[in-house]
Image (spheres, rainbow, N blue to C red):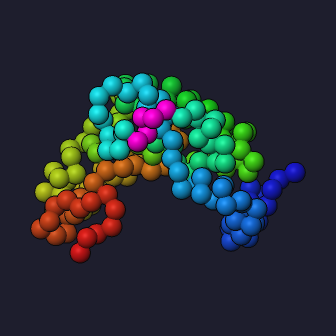
Amino acid sequence: MTTPWADPACPRDDRVEALLAEMTLEEKLAQLGSAWPGVERVSGNVAPMQDVFAHHTDFAQASKDGLGHLTRPFGTKPVEPHEGARHLASLQQELIDSTRLGIPALAHEECLTGFTTHHASVFPTPLAWAATFHPDLVERMAHAIGASMRRVGVHQGLSPRPRCRTRLPLGPRGGDPR
């Protein structure tokens, strides 16, 4: 039997309402959390707040009520894209199979100069993009990076945001500070 929130024939708003009504408080809170599978094998400091993630928690325990995000599922060492995609798919399947509601997580990876995986295209830094003051070129590069990430199951790229229409060339990852 298909649950209402997983039935693509149901209107989106109805699916969202059905899912929220079914979720416990613990499951809702779990959607705010993230796990970085494999962080315990990382050598050196490669990311902000890495020390928080480095306190190893078993993936099954970390995701028992669900999980909102998978942080760096491709890791910090060279991995072939098909191997990384297979690993990410297995993590997603584990979430679907082992949690009550079967909700997969958003996967995010770094993409400062392109998708950070083996054999991916490398682009100039966002500061260099902004210095071109050429928004169409920046948009084409961003689309290329996004497409390379989507092909392997990554939903979100983490990178500073270039500003091409102002004289302040680099913005934060979040909202505009103006």
Q: Position of residue 110 (x, y in %)?
A: 36, 43
Of 91 and 120, the residue lying toward us:
91
44 in relation to 161, above or below: above
The residue most toward the right is 1
Image quadrant of residue 16?
Answer: bottom right
Q: Position of residue 101 (x, y in %)?
A: 73, 51
Image quadrant of residue 137?
Answer: bottom left
Identify the residue at horizontal 51%, vertical 25% (top origin): 83
Residue 1 drawn in magenta: no
Q: Position of residue 104 (x, y in %)?
A: 63, 47
Q: Looking at the figure, which quarter contains the C terminus?
A: bottom left
Of 106 and 81, the residue lying toward us:
106
Identify the residue at horizontal 59%, vertical 57% (top origin): 29
Q: Is residue 101 left or right of residue 43?
A: right
Q: Which residues are magenta?
A: 52-56
147 in relation to 61, above or below: below
Identify the residue at horizontal 40%, vertical 42% (top origin): 52
